[in-house]
Image (spheres, rainbow, N blue to C red):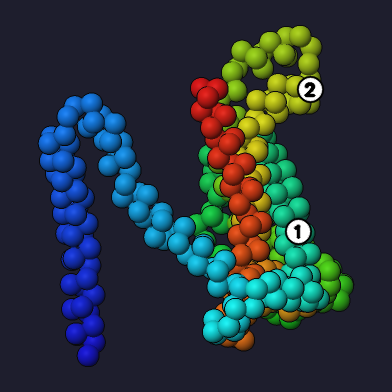
Amino acid sequence: MLTDLLNNKLLLGLIVVVGVPVVICGYILLVEAILKRLRPATGIRIRPWLWILPAIAFVTIFLVYPAIATVWRSLFDRRGDNFVGLDNYGWFFGSSDNLVAIRNNILWAILLPLLVVGIGLLVAVFAEKVRYEVAVRSIIFLPMAISAVAAGVIWRLMYDIDPRVGTLNAVVTATGGDPVAFLSTEPWNNVYLIIVGMWMMTGLAVVVLVSGLKGVPLELLEAARLDGANEWRVFWSVIYPLLRPTIAVVTTTVLIFALKTFDVVFVMTNGNFGTEVMANKMYKELFSFTQEGRAATVATVLFLATVPLMVLQVRRFRQQEEQR
């Protein structure tokens, strides 16, 4: 049985490794064959569309269609048999548990970008002042290599109320204090979970912001210092305005992460003790309560909350490209 399974996996892997390049090459040859049969003017007009057709099909099948299907599914009952209209949305905004989830997502959306961008900016600026800049940035970036589930397990152990297990409570009790129930003390437990997200995302912010700092012309910094500006004034008058587009990109990225956060909450508290978030609520409705319509409703609300941020990100990217 195990041998058959391994053989099937090897066969599937071989098909993917060999089949994908064959399909790509076949599509290229097909496109070129079609273009040769057309008039030059017509070929010039349709050539870009033929090349982006696979990408459009991929996005339509795996992104557009599931999004539309989820919105449509939110208008039906538990099993999708009966059309209930907006009843699921009435349930969502009328349930106290869902309002708690919305509140927590807003808290994540406010605190996480502030902490990540603030600390990332400090590290990016001051890391250039030390001799071991590369080592410092590498250490801060290490949490990015850890999955969110692994990070949740690590910090759950660190927050454990038992001083023999929890690192933080070991420090608290060693200094004469009483153990603290970090994960069950409301509302601070939400802040402790956000700290985990900050620990994971700060490395990304540092890398992006350092790249932005490298693009600041040294001539401007030297001119500001020659004019008598101190380092604080140089930062706010020269560095920060030039870094503003980069900061906006990092903030938007972290904000999207905050709105769709799931792994950390699921692993550490599973939404208990007032830490529920919308993504975890969607998971429970679908897999714990088998409420497919309500789960689709939560997913739709979460999707609608992230769409404006994605649109803003695309607009800023286009503005940056135009400025270049």
Q: Which residue is mark 1?
A: 106
Crowding at dot 2, Cα within 10 Å, few <14 / some 14-19 / many 20+, comes out as some
Q: Position of residue 313 (x, y in %)?
A: 59, 41
At 55% from the left edge and 40% from the top edge, which residue is drawn?
A: 314
Classify 255 as above or below 273: above
For mark 2, give the secondary structure.
helix
Q: Position of residue 238 (x, y in %)?
A: 70, 21
Looking at this view, is 166 or 144 the one in front?
Answer: 144
Looking at this view, is 82 or 14 the one in front?
Answer: 82
Q: Is residue 133 visible?
A: no
Across the whole image, how many numbered discs are drawn on residues? Answer: 2
Q: Position of residue 71 (x, y in %)?
A: 57, 66
Q: Which amino acid, by three-letter code, is at mark 2?
A: Arg
Q: Which amino acid, by three-letter code, is at mark 1?
A: Ile
At 23% from the left edge and 26% from the top edge, which residue is drawn?
A: 41
Crowding at dot 1, Cα within 10 Å, few <14 / some 14-19 / many 20+, comes out as some
Looking at this view, is 222 or 108 the one in front?
Answer: 108
Q: Is residue 141 visible?
A: yes
Farthest residue, direction bottom: 1
Classify 234 as above or below 123: above
Q: Position of residue 302 (x, y in %)?
A: 64, 62
Q: Is residue 188 left or right of residue 53?
A: right
Residue 22 figure quarter: bottom left
Classify 269 as above or below 259: below
Q: Is residue 140 left or right of residue 8?
A: right
Q: Which mark is residue 248?
A: none
Of mark 1 and mark 2, the one earlier in the sequence is 1
- Alpha carbon distance from label 1 to label 2: 33 Å
At 41% from the left edge and 54% from the top edge, which residue is drawn?
A: 59
Q: Is residue 182 left or right of residue 2?
A: right
Quarter of the image that includes the N terminus: bottom left
Q: Which residue is mark 2?
A: 233
